Amino acid sequence: MVDDRVEETARIVVVGAGQAGFSVCAKLRELGHPGPITLIGNESHPPYQRPPLSKGYLLGETTEERLYLRPLNFYEERGIDLKLSTDVQRIDRSAHEIMLSDGLRLGYERLVLATGARPRRLPAQMGGDLDGVCYVRNLADINSMSHRFRNGQQVLVVGGGYIGLEAAAVSAKLGLNVTLIEATPRILQRVASPETSNYFRALHAGHGVKLIEGVGLKILRGDNGRIKVAELADGSVVPVDFVIVGIGVHPNVELAEQAGLEVDNGIAVDVHCRTSDPAILAAGDCASFPWRAERIRLESVGNAIDQAEAVARTIMGLSSGYQAKPWFWSDQFDVKLQIAGLSSGYDSIVTRAGASNGISFWYYLGDQLLAVDAMNDPRVYMVAKRLIEAGQSPVADLVANFATDLKSLLGAKN
């Protein structure tokens, strides 16, 4: 166990008031840190959940207040100084200070960077600056585009990853005419098997979404600054009222770079979530960390929470190292996809039919189970998650046999 415990009076400053930043502060108080804690966010809202933005919130099924991770009195009661609508301009590592956008300098004994990520944007030369080009990342994004979701509107979704597919599903449910384009040969190509792609292709087609795969966007054209049509790489033209862009994200590493911290596909941290400056730690979408024989960055709520809590344990001198347990989910139409593990490097897929309309795809590398995609099958997901975290790999034939009791897989030999 690494003992980096700070003094009881040490000031902890957390930059980024998203899921990771909030979780660092909450865990520090839970572990008993009595010193001052400051949480700095550049949005005007207190920390909130982001996954419902492209689902329930966009559908109007949940209110803004229900997105908040905690009410404002939570921060007051726990002595967390919440500074909203505030940017951090610079880190002065030698003085252990940060410079804020309001001109103040704030000292720290430990600084945590939880700066998140931002959407990749279409360049202006492709029409990215036209009115009607939208992104799905924060509350301001959703609030600014919500008035566009009117029955019969023509929406083009650029990008066939999970964000794009979720946006397409919500748009279709609200009665819009939806076209989704994906430049690679199939949707979800970067993150899922052909079997999972086929499943969601059929799901969306069954709800009236027009999917165009293997065709990228050439340019967006407008009239008086407002978008009108999209020209695709194959020469076809799609009339549009607005566009939702979901082509990935950039980790927000600029503050770390300016401070001279090591950056490698995100702010590079060690197994204890420390950056190249041991007084500065990082967590969440902005941080890359050691994983087996490589360095990865996970964009998920689960990782944001787990890594943030690992940061708090490091600060409190309780760290035994961060062990990532990747899990993700996506809601589209009446399907809940739950993913356990990371599928990269797989060489075979095992399909397991589930009860009712459930189905799951199990990713193997040789005899090793890497990951599972479970659609409307929460029991499979829970068993698979336990198997992967325990390093157990049930025989593929047992998995494929619907008669195999799921619980028996937990006791199966590798």
Image (tube, helix red, strand yellow):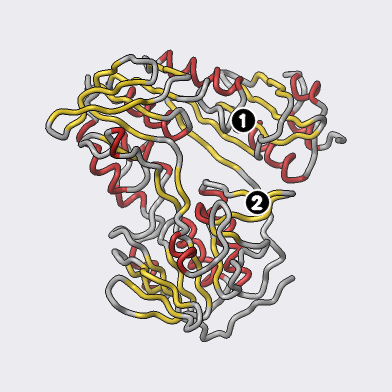
Residue sitting at the far right: 413
10 Å neighbourhood of mark 2: few (<14), some, or many (≥20)? some
Depth check: give the residue in front, 251 or 22.
Answer: 251
Mark 1 or mark 2: whose residue is earlier in sequence: 2
Instruction: Find residue 242 and report its horizontal and vertical position in percent.
Output: 25, 29
Q: Residue at x 60, y 21 (%)?
A: 194
The residue that disc 2 covers is 295
Depth check: give the residue in front, 237 or 402.
Answer: 237
Q: Residue at x 67, y 71 (%)?
A: 318
Instruction: Find residue 228 and report its horizontal and vertical position in percent.
Output: 20, 25
Callout 2 secondary element: strand
Total of numbered circles in the picture?
Answer: 2
Q: Residue at x 60, y 68 (%)?
A: 276
As drawn, is 114 to the left or to the right of 361? left
10 Å neighbourhood of mark 1: few (<14), some, or many (≥20)? many
Mark 2 residue type:
Arg
